[in-house]
Image (cartoon, coloured by chain):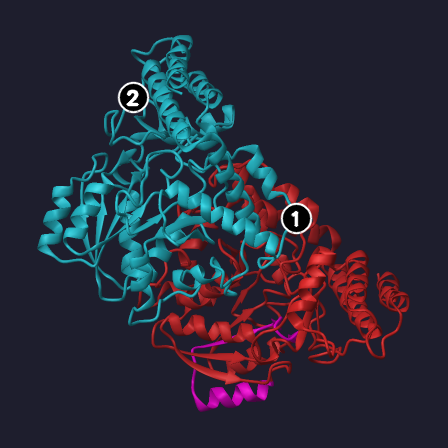
Chain colours: A red, B cyan
Amino acid sequence: MGSGPSNPDPRVLHAMAQDLLGQFDPAFTVIMEETQAELRRLFQTRNRGTFPVSGTSRAGMEAAVVSLVEPGEVVLAVENGRFGRLFEEIARRAGAEVAVLRAPWGTPVDPVDVERALARRRAAVVTLVHGETSTGTLNPVAEIAAVAHRHDALVVVDAVSTLGGARLDVDGWDVDVCVAGCQKCLGCPSGLAPVTYSDGVARRMAKRGTLIRSNYLDLTQLERYWSPERLNHHTAPTTMVYGLREALRLVADEGLETRIRRHEAAGQAMAAGLRALGFLPFGPPPGPLKMPMLTPVLVPEGVDDLKGRARLLDEQGIEIMGAFGGLAGQVWRVGTMGYNARRAPVLRTLTALAAVLGPLPGGASIGEALLEADRYWETLAAAS
Amino acid sequence: MGSGPSNPDPRVLHAMAQDLLGQFDPAFTVIMEETQAELRRLFQTRNRGTFPVSGTSRAGMEAAVVSLVEPGEVVLAVENGRFGRLFEEIARRAGAEVAVLRAPWGTPVDPVDVERALARRRAAVVTLVHGETSTGTLNPVAEIAAVAHRHDALVVVDAVSTLGGARLDVDGWDVDVCVAGCQKCLGCPSGLAPVTYSDGVARRMAKRGTLIRSNYLDLTQLERYWSPERLNHHTAPTTMVYGLREALRLVADEGLETRIRRHEAAGQAMAAGLRALGFLPFGPPPGPLKMPMLTPVLVPEGVDDLKGRARLLDEQGIEIMGAFGGLAGQVWRVGTMGYNARRAPVLRTLTALAAVLGPLPGGASIGEALLEADRYWETLAAAS
């Protein structure tokens, strides 16, 4: 119940227990095509270059940067949290000249600040995190993409935590490259990183003047395996693809709109329940710039971060996350992602927190908190 | 039944269907430690730096090269097949000056040639493939490592196809870095790349003058996650680790020596059965420089490579592999790896080939071929 990985739907795990097909077996290439079609639907894009990279989300971020950016090009890394900073590090190692726009952790990035940074120094690429799980903040991707494009920069977006759980519209928002993960709102184990990029990006990568510094993460080669050419590259992790395909089927069955509303309801329920228990919220207030699937709260007065979380795990089998950098020890992050964005895990987590911590100052009874949380599912039912 | 991936033991798939643990959950770190201990036993090493990289075998090869080699350093890539050539490409992209020693495909590399190449041009690193699955050839790793060390070069060995199926002795052979895969003789789906490297290599990586060009494949950071420090790096693909741990347990239960003999028996059985059916062998003759787990044969006269293999897959559900480069269309590669190195898959594959191709010139009846193949298991039983 932290910031991911989330517990997968048992149907996803069951799919992963099936025996292997060869990666060029026609039965498997059908699975690949289904996976790509569902990913396009989910990213809301018509990009041909849409497929999972064979590594965790971070591999997808690195594949995007190393394939797109030539050494010496300027990358503007927009940072209002831990994962924005990760882009900075990846770009630096890829040989980019990195300019950094730092914004306060826990506050959405202001597009005006991006405009100013690009006016000060031209950049080829802007990197940006959609849902900054280190603080629970959503950044205004469409607005920042528009700013970047006015300055002839491409935008690379990390949507690891938001794909399948919040509104994300790659074509509508004019995002050039978008990278996701499967272990958050998609509810599939970690190990693949869905990416999508525009035809313009594909052309730019094809005609770059320097060799892409990675073979394993070279998107131009990976796209050739994930296309009718079926270029022989690495040995595909077919079991992971089974899992992702099943997870995407479950999204399609549920319907993306319903799924997004479910994540909103679960996040509101968790936030309401935590508030009722006496927790104080951290990060943006409810609204379009708060991540629905992650609820950050202040660690209660008098509670030790590590000891509190260790007891929750030992005594109750529930994992929630601490925080990074200056927020470490101050903030807990409670997730409601994928299969965990349901009534039972929310109620269970609230009960476990109450059992471990006892009453908090100003908190209601656990019974009241549970009923407070549970109300939000009624909203969901009424809306659907 | 090709050159891998092989079908996993059902117990491995079952392990992968278990629900997730967080990557810092004490229950999971116990699994990590067990995995590392079993990997050390299998690599026959005491190297502290022993853990799986979160990607397929190729990611492990790239992690080794990109973490070890600084841009501008000379790498001697020893190539007598497709996978030796892959090291060349990876090293070039990592910014190395690459010298290439080409040897004929299908013949083991002669250490004398390596000696001459290093005398002509000093190199910091020599890359070498232990089992070259493109041709079924084993290279003399210990001898080449000794040559490299006389010339102050480190040796990076690809043991992707041999770990868990053939003799491999990292410490005894004085191998500096060894990279493996889990989808061949370990019988686990593709997606993790076990690596091991000496303390000397770890020190060299720690004090390099330039930033490692990859964050995702930076062995110095990965080692800090796979150690009591538990550095927060990428979101570990825990499901894959479950699979690998189970595969390693099965190796331990069977005993490494028995497992190696089983792979030898299965390879001999397959080779004998194919010979009896009228197939002509390709590559090194039986002996210490032939891979036991892969049997390359010439595509029979009058049979079309692609059509023959497509019929085998369509009509019989059996996949075998074609070949690369100049051997494409000429050679088929039949594997007996991991869970497929058993009586039933060998007999089934021989029967399927006979059913699809009909009698070959000079071939015995299918009945005789099966009995010929099956004899080798008696050898195994007698030896154990």
The reply, left or right, for residue B114 in relation to residue A365 is left
Q: Amino acid at mark 1?
A: Asp
- Residue located 67% across and 52% down the image: A8
Which quadrant does the C terminus of chain A fall into? bottom right
Q: Nearer the viewer, residue B272 or A144?
A: B272
For label 1, the crowd category at 10 Å Cα-Cα, with few meaning under 14, some 14 to 19 and many 20 or more, is: some
Query: From mark 2 to mark 1, how far is it between C-alphas?
Result: 51 Å
For label 2, the crowd category at 10 Å Cα-Cα, with few meaning under 14, some 14 to 19 and many 20 or more, is: few
Label 1 secondary element: loop
- Residue located 56% across and 45% down the image: B242
Q: Nearer the viewer, residue B80 or B376?
A: B376
- Point out which mark residue B301 bears: 2
**Residue B111, percent from left and from top:** 15, 42
Label 2 secondary element: loop
**Residue position marked by numbered label 1 in the rendering:** B19
Name the quadrant containing residue A4: bottom right
Q: Which of the chains bears the disc numbered 2?
A: B
